[in-house]
Amino acid sequence: MAAVGDHGSPDSYRSPLASRYASPEMCFVFSDRYKFRTWRQLWLWLAEAEQTLGLPITDEQIQEMKSNLDNIDFKMAAEEEKRLRHDVMAHVHTFGHCCPKAAGIIHLGATSCYVGDNTDLIILRNALDLLLPKLARVISRLADFAKERASLPTLGFTHFQPAQLTTVGKRCCLWIQDLCMDLQNLKRVRDDLRFRGVKGTTGTQASFLQLFEGDDHKVFRNHGSQTLLHTDSICTDIRLLANLKEMEEPFEKQQIGSSAMPYKRNPMRSERCCSLARHLMTLVMDPLQTASVQWFERTLDDSANRRICLAEAFLTADTILNTLQNISEGLVVYPKVIERRIRQELPFMATENIIMAMVKAGGSRQDCHEKIRVLSQQAASVVKQEGGDNDLIERIQADAYFSPIHSQLDRLLDPSSFTGRASQQVQRFLEEEVYPLLKPYESVMKVKAELCL
């Protein structure tokens, strides 16, 4: 049997986010080593500030702390925590063991929140610094995709029923628009993070007032100073388009879609994004409920919750963005399938244009409308009852009533005439909204997303 805490053993549960999905960089940011090394860095900064403000802390003590920031005895810390039932004091003792000269001034005047909360804030900032470039790269890849296919007509859907034509690029811009708002929101959250500061147990700075013998000026100087959920919608669209055989996510040469059905090409990456996005959405309630029950100056019932939900949220977001970038770098479009579906639906969409052309040729709008209504019902019956192709145009061509516009039918059925200003909208959106937003991330755009699973 695995020992308690033996999380690397196959006999012990490990979060799939860490073992299967999230990037090594994000996993490291939420690792014990990174966390407790940051605790020590905070204790060092505190000691340096206190020395600057006149407390009897020597350069030798400061140097001893600096030299042992990475010298963490995790076994000793675990034993100390088991004995003391207090993780911060366990690490105070562990740090003091390798810094005997500085042991007496470690954590001087501070509280557990000084290291715990500020470390969380540093971790959140650094985790956001990992997410922001990844989200920017997803937007960049989709922008390239949208630009390349800005003019490719495709059937639009409302209620997942055939509507009017749009373009593949314009549809992609709807995805990009949501992600651009996410990028702006994440950047704002990152820039607005506030360091907790050092003010003692209840924020009054009383302990520091005692340390500095009532010098209020020195006390003042010592004072330190959501989202990705749109991916669920994007990846659902990709999954539906895969069913229609119009677009697919990347599919590796030796990838197996189904253990039972060899022909299957299941959109497993998009499915993974949707699955994890739902998990991320459920995590939103965790911090909301935790924040709502913090009593007076503070309680500790946030601690265990934060250990789980913060890491889970960022590892989940990291996985989603890694996967979505990989998808966006290899999206495959099948224009012939799109063209065939347009041919099936376009005759019905073109009926208004046909009526207008007949009126211009001298026909009656009401007579023409009735003729097309009858022919449309007949064509729809062929499609639905007989499983045949839409033959409305053939019926119009065979009807002498429409002879004045027979020569115009090809022009009236040109798909590009049904997409309006979609291609221009794509170009303008990319140039005015997307490219300026991505400019700060130009140096990290070449990084590729590789998935192991």
Image (tube, grey):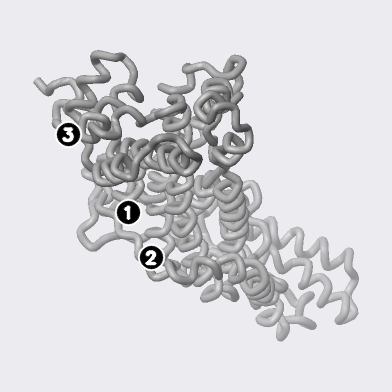
The image quadrant of residue 47 is top left
**Percent x, y of residue 215:** 60, 32
Q: Which residue is mark 1?
A: 265
SS state under label 1: loop
Q: Residue at x 44, y 57 (%)?
A: 134
Q: Earlier in the sequence, mark 2 or mark 3?
A: 3
Secondary structure of the residue carrying tag 3 is loop
User: Closer to the N terminus: mark 1 or mark 2?
Assistant: 1
Q: Residue at x 45, y 62 (%)?
A: 247
In this view of the protein, which residue sits in the foreground, 2 or 204?
204
**Residue on which the image places disc 2:** 330
- Give the distance between the C-alpha atoms of the residues marked 2 and 3, in whole angstroms: 34 Å
Q: Residues within 10 Å of mark 2 (few under 14, many from 20)?
A: some
Residue 428 % position (x, y): 68, 74
Question: Position of 170 compared to 308: left or right?
Answer: right
| 90 over 17 or under it: above or below | above
Q: Residue at x 58, y 50 (%)?
A: 191
Q: Is residue 4 visible?
A: yes
Q: Nearer the viewer, mark 2 or mark 3?
A: 3
Circle 1 Cα neighbour tier, 10 Å, few/some/many (<14 / 14–19 / ≥20): some
Is residue 151 depicted above or below 448 in this figure?
below
Residues tagged 3 and 1 counted as in contact (Cβ below 8 A): no
